[in-house]
Amino acid sequence: MAIRLLVADDHTIVRQGLVSMLEETGECEVVAQAADGNEAVELAMRTQPDVVVTDLSMPRLSGLEVVKRVREKLPHTKALVLTVHEEEEYILPIIRAGASGFLNKDTSVADLMTAIKTIHSGQAYFGPRAAKALADQHQRPREVGLDPYDTLTARERETFQLVVEGKTTKEIAQILDIGVKTAENHRARMMEKLGLRNTAEVVRYAARKGLLS
């Protein structure tokens, strides 16, 4: 039976190319495509795929947030994150979010299919750099500590993403369907938890974590 996939990437050409290559293998059925993180979560709830293949950097909700929400609501659905980043500071948050796999975007289709089949079978699939990052964390757990981003609530992470996209507090309130004062509070708490003082610092923080689309 073909593995049912949801593919999420905000770059249309990349997403459609990925879908085409995966379906050509004859081992996958792409049941949904998403152009942003919010759509990815909504479509995952609707289609309940076996595996979500998501880009790390996306608008509305980041790939990290997609993984967290899908894993919370659909524990049997696995998540594979694709990214151009392989540094430890990017890998560890992906693992903490609950992803079952991690691959660099320049990987071959054969390796991508191997990863998909591996995590679909219930195993994890991480490249050598991810394995090294995990080993390093195990050897020096006191140095790693809790990522401040992980302390944000779901609403604060949504606010974070919208601030990164340049939305004003009023626009954030409209998008999230909340009051302006509530949006201001979410923004203030988010920035306080991350130790950031202004929008420019939020954007730089997102860039360091590979969350810029």
Image: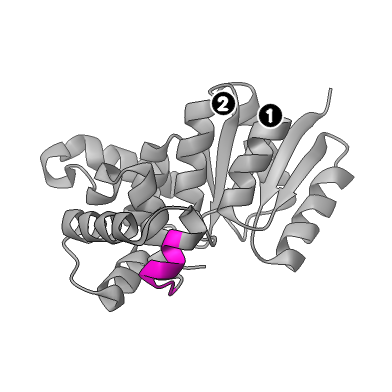
Residue 184: x and y, percent?
Answer: 28, 61
Which quadrant of the figure has residue 104? bottom right
Q: Which residue is mark 1?
A: 48
Disc 2, SS: loop
- Return the residue at label 2: 74
N-terminal-most mark, 1 or 2: 1
The type of residue carrying mark 1 is Gln
Dot 1, how many residues are within 10 Å of its Cα: few (below 14), some (14-19), or many (20+)?
many
Q: Are marks 1 and 2 in contact (CB under 8 Å)?
A: yes
Residue 12 can be seen, yes or no: yes
Q: Residue at x 88, y 37 (%)?
A: 26
Where in the figure is residue 84, as x and y percent of width and height? 52, 62
Q: Is residue 91 toward the left or the right of residue 115 in the image?
A: left
Q: What is the span of residues highlighted in magenta in the rendered image?
A: 166-173
Residue sitting at x 73%, y 45%: 110
Q: Residue furthest left?
A: 142
In the rendered view, does 35 fall on the left or right side of 29?
A: left
- Specify the amino acid type for callout 2: Leu
**Magenta span contains residue 145:** no
Q: Is residue 183 above or below residue 47?
A: below
Counting every numbered tag in the picture gives 2
Q: Magenta region's main secondary structure?
A: helix
In the picture, measured across the screen, residue 14 lies left or right of residue 174, that is: right
Q: Of helix, strand and loop, which one carries label 1?
A: loop
Residues 31 and 191: in front is: 191
